[in-house]
Amino acid sequence: MAKARRRRVRDTWKEKKWYVIKSPKMFGENEIGTTPSRDPDFLLKRRVEATMRELTGDFSKQYVKLKFQIDNVAGSEATTKFIGHQVTTDYVRSMIRRGTSRIDAPVIVETKDGYRMKIHPLAITIRRAKSSQQKYMRQSIEEHVKEIASEKTFEELVEGIVTGKIASEIYHQAKKIYPLKRVEIIKTKVLEEPA
């Protein structure tokens, strides 16, 4: 019986190098993590998530998850770009109570500098609203968000969303229609960048 020769397994782990991942300029170019890779080109388009607390140290923003994508590698540093954000589901659930209405108003907007984004505002009413009131509220929120986005650059829009300024603008606009408890932008996604 012939003995099968064992092939030596190449340890690819030793060939890998560690890269520091930095947040985009609008988030202060802070370190958000490290990642190993054999080739810097393999890092491109890799996605990274970080909470707002990790970037700013503000514990009250623990529920905001920011999504980044690596777009450039120089030396042992990988820079990222903002591709979206999301609020944790448990935080959204904690806002909704019995006897209230949840009004979702997802809308696709275009910024002043040509970025296309999907923005998902969520409004919670104090009491249950009629479906006609909800429909009117949804329309007015969508129009207001489109208007805000068209007047701002991508960076200004992202900053307004993450800090909650835009949510409070929507709240003050929409509460004229029906009493609101809260407005939160629960999700964003960058669909298209200017060429």
Image (tube, rainbow, N blue to C red):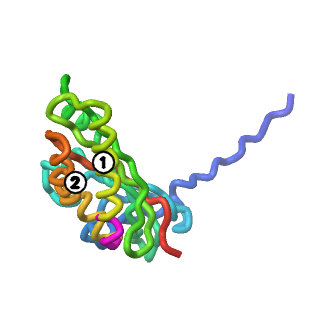
Secondary structure, magenta segment, majority class: helix
Q: Pointer 1: residues within 10 angstroms few (<14), some, or many (20+)?
A: many
Please name whichever residue, 131 or 67, is drawn nearer the observer in this view of the structure.
Answer: 131
Q: Indicate whether residue 151 is drawn in magenta.
A: yes
Q: Residue furthest top?
A: 98
Q: Residue furthest right?
A: 1
Residue type indicated by callout 2: Ile
**Residue located 55% across and 62% down the image:** 42
Can residue 86 be seen here? no
- Rendered location of residue 160, percent (x, y): 23, 63
Residue 104 falls left or right of residue 174: right
**Residue located 30% across and 48% down the image:** 121
**Residue located 19% across and 35% down the image:** 95
Q: Quadrant of the N terminus?
A: top right
Q: Which residues are magenta?
A: 148-153
Residue at numbered disc 1: 121
- Rendered location of residue 19, percent (x, y): 41, 65
- How many numbered discs, if any? 2
Residue 45 falls left or right of residue 103: right
Can residue 79 be seen here? yes
Please name whichever residue, 67 or 177, is drawn nearer the observer in this view of the structure.
Answer: 177
**Residue located 16% across and 46% down the image:** 175
Disc sitting over residue 48 in the figure: none
Disc sitting over residue 170 in the figure: 2
Label 1's element? strand
Q: Quadrant of residue 132?
A: top left
Label 2's element? helix
Residue type indicated by callout 1: Pro
**Between discs 1 and 2, the one toward the N terminus:** 1
How many angstroms separate mark 1 from mark 2 (CA)? 9 Å
Kindly check if marks 1 and 2 are in contact, taking CB atoms under 8 A apart as contact: yes
- Rendered location of residue 86, percent (x, y): 33, 48
